[in-house]
Amino acid sequence: MSRWHPTLTVERWAGFPFESRLVMVQNELSRARSSQAAGYYGGTRLALERALELLDLTVETCIREPGLRELLRWRERIAKAYLFPEDPIPEDLVQGPSPAPRSG
C-alpha cells in the first residue's frame, strides 16, 4: 500500500497513459523545487517522496519496456536529491528522461 497515494494501485496507475504518469512525477518535482526556493526543505522532501512513490509505480508497470534503464537512472537522481534537500534541484531532473518509443 502506498504512503501518499493509498488508493493508487499498480493496476490503476498502469491505466494512465505513460506520458501522463511522467507528467505527474514531474509535477511533484516541480513542487519540490518551489518548496526548496522558499527555503522549506521539509516540503522539498515530502514532494520528492511523492515523486519517488509515483516513479516506483511507473517502474513496476514498465519492467519489460524500453526506457526502463532511463527511468531507474531518473529514480536514482531523485533519491539523491531526497538525501540532500538543500542542494539545488537541477531543471533537467524535473524534466525527466525522454520518453522511449512505446508500442500500443
Image (spheres, helix red, strand yellow):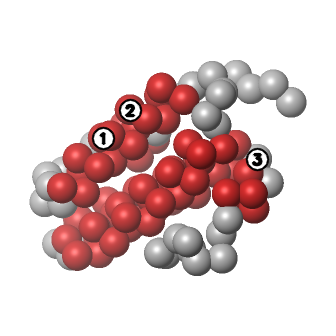
Residue visible at 46% across and 41% down in the picture: 95
Residue visible at 70% across and 22% down in the picture: 101
User: Distance from label 3 to label 2 (Cα)?
Assistant: 21 Å
User: Distance from label 3 to label 1 (Cα)?
Assistant: 23 Å
The quadrant in which residue 34 appears is bottom left
User: Distance from label 1 to label 2 (Cα)?
Assistant: 6 Å
Residue nearer the viewer, 68 or 33: 68
Residue nearer the viewer, 95 or 79: 79
| Coordinates of residue 39 in the picture (x, y in percent) | 17, 72
Chain-order first, disc 3 or disc 1: 3
Tell me the kind of residue under disc 2.
Arg
Q: Report if residue 20 is visible in the image.
A: yes
- Give the residue number, with chain letter if any, for mark 1: 77
- Give the residue number, with chain letter if any, for mark 2: 73
Question: Is label 3 in contact with label 2 (beta carbons under 8 Å)?
Answer: no
Q: Report if residue 23 is visible in the image.
A: no
Say which mark, if any, is on residue 27: none
Tell me the kind of residue under disc 3.
Pro
- Give the residue number, with chain letter if any, for mark 3: 17
Give the vertical position of 104 relative to 48 (above or below). above
